[in-house]
Amino acid sequence: MNVEILGLIAGALTAIASMPQLIKVIKTKNVEDISWLMLAILISGLSLWVWYGFEQDELPIILSNSFAVIVNVTLLTCYFIFRDKKK
Amino acid sequence: MNVEILGLIAGALTAIASMPQLIKVIKTKNVEDISWLMLAILISGLSLWVWYGFEQDELPIILSNSFAVIVNVTLLTCYFIFRDKKK
């Protein structure tokens, strides 16, 4: 099996698995269960993975982690928007 | 910067970010918000990442995704244990 295709399938599956939380937060506007600190740590880690992907020149790593960065930055943005609205 | 160290730091950060959910589920025994289907998709994706890591011979990929598989298999196990206890 082509390793790049393997990585792209792996990335697609982990990307799909991250969507329900985002959809739920956008729908319910409930961010009580979200820790902004953990999101910040996660976004830092994912960004380093993107950097790692560029260093290694591996497209699946770059694509899947860039996507995850976008999802989690959106979650973090939702957190600050919806948290402030509750006050 | 050594690319392997970069990957290990990235993996450590994403691993740390995954712990609060596990700790919360074990402490509260509340698995209402967990979707077993999404966990199954996530575990499949992470397992393919481990496979990808072996194919590419990249230790950071293997280590971080193996750790994530363990965390999420534990979550899935908690889901079935605590869900059945509620019934």
Image (cartoon, coloured by chain):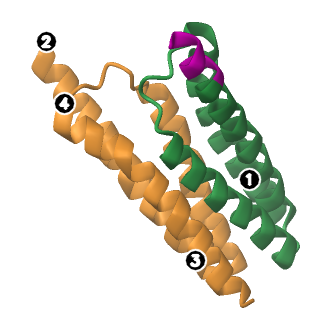
Chain colours: A green, B orange
Depth-wise, is mark 2 or mark 1 nearer the camera?
1
> Residue drawn 21% across and 22% down?
B83
Above or below B41: residue A19:
above
Disc sitting over residue B8 in the figure: 3
**CB contact under 8 Å: marks 4 and 3:** no
Quarter of image, res A51:
bottom right
Query: 10 Å neighbourhood of mark 4: few (<14), some, or many (≥20)?
Result: some
Expressed as whole percent of the image width and height from the top left, the position of residue A81 reads 65, 21
Per the picture, the main secondary structure of the magenta-coloured stretch is helix
What's under tag 4, amino acid-wise? Lys
- CA–CA distance in space, label 3 to label 2: 42 Å
What's under tag 2, amino acid-wise? Lys
Range of residues picked out in magenta: A81-87
Above or below A55: residue B52:
above
Instruction: Name the residue that disc number 4 marks.
Output: B29
What's under tag 3, amino acid-wise? Leu
4 or 3: tag closer to the N-terminus: 3
Chain hosting mark 2: B
**CB contact under 8 Å: marks 4 and 1:** no
Above or below B43: residue B60:
below
Element on which disc 4 rests: loop
Disc sitting over residue A30 in the figure: none
Instruction: Name the residue that disc number 2 marks.
Output: B87
